[in-house]
Structure formats: structure tokens, C-alpha cells
């Protein structure tokens, strides 16, 4: 995210999102009643006094008071809906509804309804990248995924046809592994993907066979393009293998700065506390509100869809403001991750405490 201007006194920021991950971060920064200004297209309405008809679409700089944010994970568009508060007079748009469609490269001015929260400023500082392409090759299914800051995006799944049982096991897998290699090369050829790392995860026998196929068809095409390739053994492939891979010690060492890996270790800490120090973890809004009110929260962990759905509610606002005042950390976990799914199962929000609390 390129921050062109930041004025904390006026709670104002001008940003240019540079990737889909930046759009994801913007969706977490924006709140109901924020003011959002951007260049946009608006349809002219032409009236002769008796009837009104739609005219051409014209480019105009329009400000809206935000009512709703729509973001589809891994998409290139963030839709911001609201009521027009500022627009050229000839549009006669004041008080009507308008939707800003924000894409990478489009400049946006945001004026917050209140001061920036610390987690929002942290999100503004982050710069996204596609970390790795994962080929999780299983006996019957392969998942080709991109590891992003906002989670794991599954680009493609490939299923193996059973083949002729009279042929050898190696021959039965030949066409399947060839297709996986061919599709992988097609995806790696996409300039916009921007990954520098390729991780191949599979069972020991398939890993050996697939390595041969990669050496034969893929590596000659990508050699010299700066890819780093890692091989990791997993017990099964497909989507399940992707999540097993992210839990593996090798990948956590390779990508210790990756947010997805951090979120997984964070949720491990939550479950460890449940078993060893349950008084130092709070779940449920009633417990969390009490812990926040006395400054006991060290880390407030929230799944992203919970944040979008409830951030405008008075109780959530009080909790977030109390955590901010006590210098606690607010951490947003993407639902499109194993850690996010675990967190959703706990209600979408959980707090790690600075000291033990007992609730009557």
C-alpha cells in the first residue's frame, strides 16, 4: 500500500492500493460513516421538466459517507457503498447513493469518523506480496495454490482418473503428473502472479516421480527466472496437504515472516493456554469486554469477517477502544486460512490476557 499522505490530527489518509492484498487491508480499515473520496464514473440524469432520462457516463470526483464495504477474497475490486456528500453540481447527486469501485492503482482519500486505531495504522504500513506457489500433489487430487497475506488462494484442483489397473502404478500416474506439471507451467507464466518461490509438497513416492516430471517439462522453461524451489514431504496432497504443509516446521522456518504462519502459531498458543492456563484466555464477548475494561488484554485476535460484520456495533467499538488505550495488540486473522477457521469455531474473537482472570 502506497501511503501518499497521512494526517493523524485530521484522521485523513490518501492511499494507492498496489495489490489485491492492499484491497483486503483497506476493507479492514474502512468503517461505517467514514468519508471516502475518489474519481469515479457517474451517469448523468437529463430532465426536460416532465420526464427524466439517463445520459452518458462522466468522470467526476465524488465523496460518499460509507455505509457498506464489499470485498471478495483475492479479487481485484473493492466496492464501497454510501451516500453522496460531495459531487459536482451538474450531477445533481447530493444525497443519492453511489458505489466507489476501488482497484489497484486507484488513489483514494479516506477521512475517518474517529481517530485511527493502532491496528489500522499497522495495516496501512504493510506491503503485500505473493509469497509462494504451492503444488500439493496427492494420489487422487492436486491443489495448486498461492500463499498470500490474506490467506491461501486455491487457483486450481486437478483430479486423477483411475486408469487401467493392468498397467504399472508408475504408468497410471504418468498422465496425471504430466497434467499437473503442464498446468503449473501455465500458472508460473502469468506475469501478474509475481511469485518467486515454488513449494512442491507430496508423499515420498509421488514426490520422486513428480520431481522427474518437473525436471523434464517445467524447470527447463523457468530456469534463469529466479525461482527458488523447495520440496516438502506430506502425508497427503490436495487442499488438506496445503494446510499440513503450513503446519510443518520446515515451512515455518522458511517463511517465519509470513502472516499465515504467524497466525497458525498464534492459534496454537490459544489452544495451549486452554489446556495449561485457561485463566489467561478469554472467549465470548462478555468475558472479553470485562478483560478489556480493566486493561488485561495483551492480544485481541479477531477473524476478518467478524470484524466487517460487527465493527460498527457499540459493544465491539468499546472493546477495541479499551484494548487500544491499554496498548494491547489487535490482530486480524483471515478466514481463508486454517487459523481463521479455528478462530471462527471459537466465535470469531478471542483474547490472550496479560494475567489470569477468574470469571464468576
Image: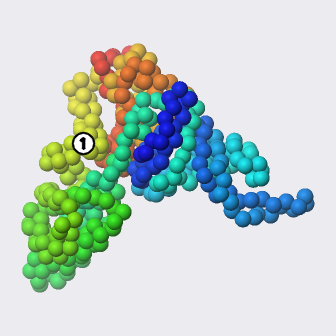
Residue extending farthest right? 50
Residue extending farthest front? 4
- Residue depicted at x 46% and y 27%: 320
Horizontal side of 92 relative to 346 (left or right) equals right
Q: How is the image coloured?
A: rainbow
The C terminus lies in quadrant: top left
Q: What element does badge 1 sit on?
A: loop
Q: Nearer the viewer, residue 285 or 144?
A: 144
Residue bearing mark 1 = 257
* Above/below status of 16 relative to 347: below
Indicate the position of residue 176 as horizontal and vertical percent values.
Answer: 21, 75
Horizontal side of 76 relative to 260 (left or right) equals right
- Residue depicted at x 13% and y 76%: 216
- Residue depicted at x 34% and y 65%: 191
Indicate the position of residue 87 as horizontal and vertical percent values.
Answer: 70, 47
Q: Mark 1 Cα within 10 Å, few/some/many (few <14, many 20+)?
A: few
Q: Nearer the viewer, residue 291 or 317?
A: 317
- Residue depicted at x 36% and y 63%: 192
* Above/below status of 204 relative to 278: below
Q: Nearer the viewer, residue 322 or 37?
A: 37
* Above/below status of 36 relative to 212: above
- The answer to whether any part of residue 49 appears in the image is yes
How many marks the image carries: the answer is 1
Indicate the position of residue 336 as horizontal and vertical percent values.
Answer: 36, 50
Q: Residue 199's quadrant in the figure?
A: bottom left
Horizontal side of 115 relative to 63 (left or right) equals left
Indicate the position of residue 119 as horizontal and vertical percent values.
Answer: 41, 33
- The answer to whether any part of residue 173 appears in the image is no
Amino acid at each position: 500500500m502506497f501511503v501518499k499522505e497521512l494526517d493523524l490530527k485530521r484522521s485523513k489518509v490518501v492511499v494507492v492500493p498496489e495489490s489485491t492484498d492492499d484491497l483486503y487491508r483497506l476493507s479492514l480499515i474502512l468503517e461505517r460513516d467514514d468519508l471516502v473520496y475518489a474519481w469515479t464514473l457517474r451517469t448523468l440524469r437529463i430532465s426536460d421538466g416532465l420526464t427524466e432520462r439517463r445520459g452518458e457516463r462522466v468522470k467526476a470526483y465524488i465523496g460518499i459517507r460509507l455505509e457498506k464495504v464489499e470485498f471478495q477474497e483475492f479479487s481485484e475490486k473493492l466496492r464501497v457503498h454510501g451516500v453522496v456528500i460531495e459531487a459536482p453540481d451538474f450531477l445533481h447527486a447530493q444525497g443519492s447513493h453511489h458505489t466507489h469501485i476501488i482497484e489497484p492503482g486507484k488513489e483514494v482519500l479516506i477521512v475517518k469518523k474517529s481517530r485511527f486505531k493502532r491496528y489500522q495504522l499497522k495495516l496501512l504500513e504493510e506491503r503485500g506480496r505473493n509469497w509462494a506457489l504451492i503444488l500439493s500433489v496427492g494420489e487422487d487430487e492436486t491443489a495448486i495454490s498461492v500463499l498470500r497475506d490474506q490467506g491461501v488462494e486455491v487457483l486450481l484442483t486437478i483430479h486423477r482418473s483411475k486408469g487401467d489397473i493392468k498397467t504399472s502404478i508408475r504408468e497410471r500416474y504418468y498422465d496425471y503428473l504430466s497434467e499437473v506439471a503442464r498446468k503449473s507451467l501455465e500458472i508460473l507464466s502469468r506475469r501478474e502472479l509475481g511469485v518467486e518461490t515454488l513449494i512442491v509438497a507430496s508423499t515420498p513416492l509421488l514426490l520422486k516421480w513428480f520431481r522427474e516430471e518437473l525436471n523434464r517439462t517445467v524447470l527447463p522453461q523457468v530456469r534463469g527466472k529466479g525461482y527458488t524451489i523447495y520440496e516438502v514431504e506430506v502425508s497427503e496432497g490436495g487442499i488438506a496437504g496445503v494446510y499440513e504443509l503450513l503446519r510443518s516446521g520446515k515451512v515455518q522456518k522458511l517463511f517465519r515472516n509470513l502472516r499465515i504462519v504467524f497466525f497458525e502459531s498464534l492459534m496454537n498458543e490459544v489452544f495451549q493456554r486452554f489446556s495449561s492456563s485457561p485463566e489467561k484466555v478469554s472467549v465470548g464477548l462478555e468475558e472479553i469486554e470485562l478483560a478489556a475494561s480493566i486493561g488485561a488484554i495483551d492480544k485481541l485476535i479477531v477473524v476478518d469477517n467478524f470484524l466487517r460484520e460487527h465493527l460498527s456495533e457499540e459493544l465491539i467499538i468499546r472493546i477495541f477502544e479499551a484494548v487500544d488505550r491499554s496498548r494491547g495488540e489487535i490482530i486480524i486473522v483471515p478466514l481463508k486460512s486454517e487459523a481463521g477457521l479455528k478462530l471462527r469455531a471459537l466465535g470469531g474473537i478471542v483474547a490472550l490476557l496479560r494475567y489470569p482472570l477468574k470469571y464468576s
